[in-house]
């Protein structure tokens, strides 16, 4: 293991494509802030860059680096990471998703003892995980990792059956939510008037989230129920296209598109129903935040969504890319305030029982502990054999 002669806690380097507004990034920051400082130190390395979102890291001493990776293979990024890891001498390299999976060999060459990859969702351009080149890369990287975990049972099964991750190298690490932060009580940031019914969603505006279908569902619903409004909170490459779609449909004045926001907890308190229109998901952190805010969730039956949203209990599940089905589910909540309250309360209770933040942080720390101890024992055994 990396020397800890002065009892300095082991260093974990988190390798991520970009540190910006997003579910994965939010939970990464939460784990860093909450993990006991006496147990592990942390640094974040961004393959491309980071934004003001990085200011949400409040733990002292967390270093932040940007490698400014260029599009394509960018072999120089591998060399830059190798040099940085040699300087930082971490005990653990923790990479996230496909975008960072290929950097484990550089970590091995740099002498990083423990290497972990987390599957928090598939690539936005390949939501079903069918890209042969991507999957081949994942398989080629398996020998360089000590653990390849997933954040939903659906992703875990895919990792094992499609990629071939061995059982002893895989595990399920569910997301967690700060239920005290996302509560139905407190100030309300409601963009629309009090007589409206607000359907809202939060997430990066990109293909895999399929906000276009949500907007089409809203148009159908508004034709039957004029008092409904739609809020889509988040930035992303398709924001301008979504704005244009709303204008073309004649509902731009009924749709709030504020871009990325840091006051999500307050914004959620202004929603009546939460909608999740994704065509692929791991464990949807945005749905958990909505449930913690006592909102019923209309979500698509994909990936880890059915693991989170209990159909008919905390929300309603519909097929993906089906605007009429989503509109019909949203209409049920729009007409039934009692069901909204009942399902919202059940969602809050479900989060508190199964997706609490303390349990998530403890699970990651337990993984770090187990892998570090295993590597330590392995090296002791190897040294004894040599002697």
Image (cartoon, rainbow, N blue to C red):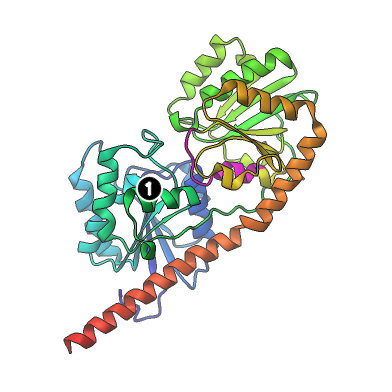
- The correct choice, above or below, for 70 with respect to 196 in the image is below
Pinpoint residue 293: horizontal percent, then vertical percent.
70, 44
Q: Which residue is at the front of the view, 59 or 18?
A: 18
- According to the image, label 1 marks what residue? 97
Per the image, label 1 sits on a secondary structure element best described as helix
**Residue at image coords 43%, 72%:** 369
247 left or right, relative to 230? left
Q: Quadrant of residue 147?
A: bottom left
Residue 188 drawn in magenta: no
Q: Which residues are magenta?
A: 279-290
**Residue visible at 29% across and 69% down in the picture:** 113
Q: What residue occupies the far bottom of the structure in this picture?
A: 387
Q: Quadrant of residue 93?
A: bottom left
Is 364 drawn above or below residue 369 in the view shown?
A: above
* Residue 283 magenta-highlighted: yes
Quadrant containing the C terminus is: bottom left
- Mark yes or no: residue 271 visible: no
In percent of width and height, residue 163 lies at 32, 50
Q: Residue at x 44, y 69 (%)?
A: 40
Left or right of residue 284: residue 274: right
């Amino acid at each position: 293991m990396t020397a800890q002669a002065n009892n300095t806690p082991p260093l974990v380097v988190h390798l991520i494509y970009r540190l910006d507004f997003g579910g994965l990034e939010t939970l990464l920051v939460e784990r860093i802030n909450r993990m006991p400082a006496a147990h592990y130190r942390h640094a974040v390395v961004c393959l491309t860059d980071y934004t003001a979102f990085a200011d949400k890291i409040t733990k002292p001493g967390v270093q932040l680096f940007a490698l400014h990776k260029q599009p394509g293979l960018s072999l120089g990024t591998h060399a830059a990471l190798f040099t940085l890891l040699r300087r930082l001498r971490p005990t653990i390299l923790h990479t996230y998703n496909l975008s960072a999976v290929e950097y484990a060999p550089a970590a091995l060459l740099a002498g990083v003892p423990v290497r972990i990859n987390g599957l928090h969702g598939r690539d936005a351009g390949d939501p079903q995980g069918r890209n042969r080149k991507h999957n081949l890369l994942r398989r080629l990287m398996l020998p360089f990792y000590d653990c390849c975990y997933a954040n939903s049972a659906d992703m875990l099964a895919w990792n094992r059956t499609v990629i071939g991750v061995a059982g002893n190298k895989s595990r399920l690490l569910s997301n967690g939510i700060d239920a005290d932060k996302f509560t139905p009580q407190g100030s309300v940031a409601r963009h629309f008037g009090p007589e409206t019914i607000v359907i809202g969603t939060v997430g990066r505006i990109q293909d895999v989230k399929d906000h276009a279908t949500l907007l089409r569902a809203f148009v159908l619903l508004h034709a039957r129920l004029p008092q409904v409004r739609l809020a889509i909170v988040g930035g992303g490459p398709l924001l301008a296209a979504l704005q244009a779609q709303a204008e073309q449909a004649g509902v731009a004045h009924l749709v709030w598109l504020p871009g990325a926001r840091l006051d999500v907890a307050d914004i959620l308190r202004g929603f009546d129903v939460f909608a999740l229109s994704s065509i692929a998901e791991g464990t949807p952190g945005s749905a958990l935040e909505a449930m913690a805010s006592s909102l019923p969730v209309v979500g698509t039956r994909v990936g880890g969504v059915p693991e989170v949203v209990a159909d008919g209990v905390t929300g309603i599940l519909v097929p993906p890319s089906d605007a009429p089905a989503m509109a019909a589910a949203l209409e049920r909540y729009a007409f039934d305030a009692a069901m909204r309250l009942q399902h919202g309360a059940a969602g809050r209770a479900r989060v508190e029982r199964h997706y609490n933040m303390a349990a998530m942080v403890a699970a990651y720390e337990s993984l770090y502990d187990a892998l570090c101890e295993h590597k330590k024992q392995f090296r002791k055994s190897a040294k004894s054999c040599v002697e």
